[in-house]
Amino acid sequence: MRYRVRTPDGELDYASLRDVEVAYVQGLVGPDDEVREEGKETWRKAASLPTLARARPEKKGLAARTQLLSVLGAVGLGAAALALILSDSWTRRGLGIVLALAMSTLLMRVTSKAFKRPGPR
C-alpha cells in the first residue's frame, strides 16, 4: 500500500509504511507532518500512527542533547590531555595519555551512535 506524506516543503510518495517509518527515524518525516494512505481521504499526523509513534520516541531536555554533551566532553578531555602531555613531569604525561585514550573511546561511541541506522525488520 502506498503512502503520501505532506510536509511544509511539499509532498512525498512512499511505497510502504516501512519506507515512511525509515524516513521518520532518519528525520525526513517529522511528527507534525501529515500522512495519508492510498485510497483514503483523511490526512493524519505522523506521530498519531502507532508504527511511527513507536519508531522514535521524542527526546526532550537533556536527553536530546547527549550527542552535543559527549562531543563537548571529548573536546574538554582532549584539551586536558594535551596540556598534561606537554608538561615536564612524566607522571602528568602518563595521565595525559590515559585521558587521550578516554577521549578516543568517547569519540568512538559518539561516531558509532551518529552512524547507527535502523535495521531491517
Image (cartoon, rainbow, N blue to C red):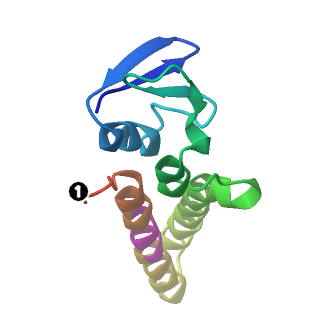
| Residue at image coords 40%, 72% | 105
Amino acid under label 1? Pro
| 90 w.r.t. 37: above or below | below
The image shows residue 106 at horizontal and vertical percentages of 46, 69
| 35 w.r.t. 63: above or below | above
Residue located beneath label 1 in the image: 120
Taken as a whole, is the magenta stretch helix, strand or loop?
helix
Residue 40 horizontal side relative to residue 77, left or right: left
Q: Quadrant of the N terminus?
A: top left
The image shows residue 75 at horizontal and vertical percentages of 56, 57
Is residue 71 inside the magenta stretch?
no
Q: Nearer the viewer, residue 61 or 8?
A: 8
Q: Nearer the viewer, residue 19 or 78?
A: 19
Please tell me in which quadrant of the rendered image residue 23 appears. top left
Q: Residue furthest top?
A: 10
The stretch of residues the image draws in magenta is: 102-107
